[in-house]
Every structure is written in structure tokens, then in C-alpha cells.
Image (cartoon, helix red, strand yellow):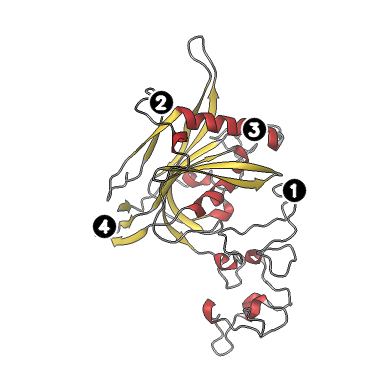
Amino acid sequence: MNKIKYYFILTIATLSLFSCSKSDSAEVVPLRDYKEQYDTDIADIEEYLKVNYITIVDAPGKAEDQDVTISAITDATTQKSIMSYLNSPTFPTLKVKDVDLHGITYKLYYLVLREGVGERPINVDGVLTSYSGQYLFRKAATTTDPSVVTSNQFEKVVFPQSFLDLYKLIKGWGETFPEFKVGTAAGQSGDGTTMYNDFGAGVMFLPSGLGYYAGGTATIPGYSPLVFSFKLYALQRLDHDGDGIYSYQEDLNGDGYVRDFRNTTEYPNQPVDNPDDTDKDGVPDFLDVDDDGDTFTTKLEIKNPDTGKPYPFDQIPKCVSGKKNYLDASCHP
């Protein structure tokens, strides 16, 4: 069980996760080829996974429960590399998934310390999470030591105060968090502390193309691979187009992800079909105010005429087709 205290923290603590608005002191660097940069990033990440080990704190009921420290291996006989946990049948286990973006396929490594017990967020939900962020860089060789990939911490949030919208964050977060589950709320203590237990906890290792790429921030150099350790306490369902249907309910194929393929930099190879776009107008349902394209807004179609309020999702009327009325252009309110 973990205690989350809602203390005041500086606004800057969460700013670096949001899409890159560079500060005046951020480094400006020329744009590189995505494939060439990825090849460099993944080599550095895999080296980092092979030469470092983890130490995990198991302290139920305390804020440090599932804290993880990454350290350089000094004794290979007693210190297992992070890479050695790849596809382990028990926790911790290192997983890898493919992410298609920028016309290439990224390998995204993530370490599962604990999966969690509650619901999984989809990639556009809000998440309540504590986290620590580091960027990787290659330390130059010296006359006595070889070149090595190491890390530098740029951010840490121990007591989160608000939910973060995964849709507005770097891509790597939206790709990783749906692989974990939230914990369970265990009430509040007398001082207002919110308590959670059995939350998902892990570490993600992101190529720069799933982070800030060339943009960087005032504290993160451009083209830096990123490492985030995190604890997923709770989720918040969001409605991005304000149509009365939560975005997670507009994940029509139920794979945990909804995507907007209109950005040709991110998706230069447009898919033939977006399974989460009912009317095939190019706008995914979670951003489309008229999901079935019948000129009747979704908000209007799900309104109960007797109450003037939206039907509960499972009570939205269905058409002859068996589809809910806002997903069938042939029937209207």
C-alpha cells in the first residue's frame, strides 16, 4: 500500500512531459534522419540494459514502495543485468514491443516490476503517476576508461497532484502505460493522504523518436533516449471531443490504443483503414463530433429526449443493424 500526499510541487515538474514547447534556453539542433537516429538510440539503450542492474524497494505502505535504482554493474556474479530479465516468466520481467512511427519500427523496451491489479488505461486516458526521468548520453572515453552509456536525472515527481493526459504527452508514455494496470484506492488517512496498493510499477526505455527527438527541453538535450521509472496509481477516463462518449469507449477494436493518422510526419505510410474511425473520414472517433458522418452530432444522437441528458453508455439506443445509433448513419434520433 502506498501513500500519495498531495503536496504542492513546482509546475515545472510536469512541464517537460508535454509536447515540446522549447524554452529560450533549449538547445536548437538540426533535424536528423529518423532511421539513422533510431539506430544510434537503440544501440545505446541495449548497451545500457546490458551493463546496468536494478535494486527494487519492497516496502508496502510506504512512499518508497517499488522505488527502483539503476546502477552500473561492478560484479557480474551477483548483479544481474537488466537485459537478463528479458521475457522472464516472473517479475521483474523485461518486455519489448514494436511501435510504428515516422516510417520506421521502433523497439520499445519496458521493465515490469509489478503489473497492477485494476483497469488498464488506453493511450489517451489520464493517469495519476509518480515518476523519475533520466536521459541517456555517451560518456567519452578517457585514457583509463572506455566510452560508456550513462544517464542523468532531469525530473522527479514523488507525490502527484493531478492526472496527466497521455494524449498530450510524449509518444512513449502513451505506448507504455496501457501495458500496466492501476492500483486500488485504500481510502484516506486522517491527514487527507490518499492511499493506494497493488499499483503497476515499471521502467520504460525510450528512443528519442518516442520522446522529444530534436526538440529537447531546457534540461534535456536534443536526440536523447529517455528512461522513466514510474508507479501507476489511478486513471481518469477523458472525452477529447466532448461528444459525451469517453475516448476509451471509442476504441472500437478494443486493443487499448486509438490513433490519429492525419499527422504525416508521424505516419507517412497511411494505413488503408483506421479501425477506430466509423465513418472513414480520416478523423478517429475519439476526435470526431459526428462519429457516423450522418450530419447528426454524436452528442445529439445519444441524448435522451425525455430527460435532455445523455443516455448511460450501455443504454444508448441501437439501430436495426445492432449498432448504437451514433455509429450507424442509416438511423437518427
Question: For residue 39, which numbered disc appears in the image?
Answer: 3
Q: Which of 257 and 240 is in front in this view?
A: 257
Q: Is residue 301 above or below residue 193?
A: below
Question: For residue 191, which numbered disc appears in the image?
Answer: 4
Mark 1: amino acid: Pro
Q: How far is disc 4 from disc 3 in space, using C-alphas? A: 50 Å
261 to the left or right of 240:
right
Q: How far is disc 2 from disc 4 in space, using C-alphas? A: 42 Å
Badge 1 crowding class, 10 Å Cα cut-off, few under 14, some 14 to 19, many 20 or more, is some
Q: Are marks 4 and 3 in contact (CB under 8 Å)?
A: no
Q: Is mark 2 on a helix, strand or loop?
A: loop
Mark 4: amino acid: Asp
Mark 3: amino acid: Asp
List x then y, in percent, for residue 49: 49, 32
Q: Which residue is drawn at 75% across and 48% down?
A: 268
Residue underneath mark 2: 73
Quarter of the rendering containing residue 192:
bottom left
Question: For residue 268, which numbered disc appears in the image?
Answer: 1
List x then y, in percent, for residue 48: 50, 30
